[in-house]
Image: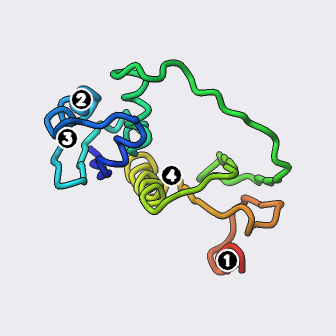
Amino acid sequence: MPIITFKRSDLEGLLGKYFSGEEELITLLNRLKGEVEGVSGDDVMFETTHDRPDLLSVEGIARSLRGGLLRIEVGLPRLNMITSGFRLVAEDVPNRPYIMMGIVRDLRLNDEAIRQMIQLQEKLHATYGRDRRKMAIGFYDADKIKPPLTYRLEKLDAIRYRPPGE
């Protein structure tokens, strides 16, 4: 089962609730579908089951605690979704026939948030993506990508990787 590591202070900041002691934190987290493997200073190691991908990041844990156990915020969040004009052209790719893309604007990420995104990406690759054989996730700076994007199958010797923005 996947084990993630996150900062206790990050969880407390996301919840707007500070735990009086380690025991209170562990008791609350163990009520989720998972188990605290250890606490070392500000670092918390949490093991969850494969059927709870929402608990593979501190943000997902905070969302689950806010809505479920702590009743701070119940119901579905309201998101403002708009059409961006960004174009994705998808051709037939037999081994990975589905593609999805999202663009998030005006998001400021600190080092811990970036670390959590990368950890979530890696846990999803390992747990569901069969180590990237069935799926892959990428994060890119949309300001450095020129649309349209094309998703297609290519021969390996025809691929020339160029980092975004170059």
Q: Are marks 4 and 2 in contact (CB under 8 Å)?
A: no
Relative vertical location of residue 91 with respect to residue 155 in this rendering, above or below: above
Query: Any mark on residue 134, and which?
Result: 4
Inspect the image, locate mark 1, and give the three-letter code of the amino acid beneath it. Answer: Ile
- What residue does disc 3 label? 36
Relative vertical location of residue 53 with respect to residue 102 in this rendering, above or below: above
Disc tally is: 4
- What residue does disc 1 label? 159
Q: Are marks 1 and 3 in contact (CB under 8 Å)?
A: no
Which is in the foreground here, disc 3 or disc 2? 2
Q: Are marks 1 and 4 in contact (CB under 8 Å)?
A: no
Rounded to the nearest whole Å, what is the CA distance between mark 1 and mark 4? Answer: 20 Å
- What residue does disc 2 label? 28
Mark positioned earlier in the residue sequence (3 or 4): 3
- Pointer 4: residues within 10 angstroms few (<14), some, or many (20+)? few
Left or right of residue 115: residue 24: left
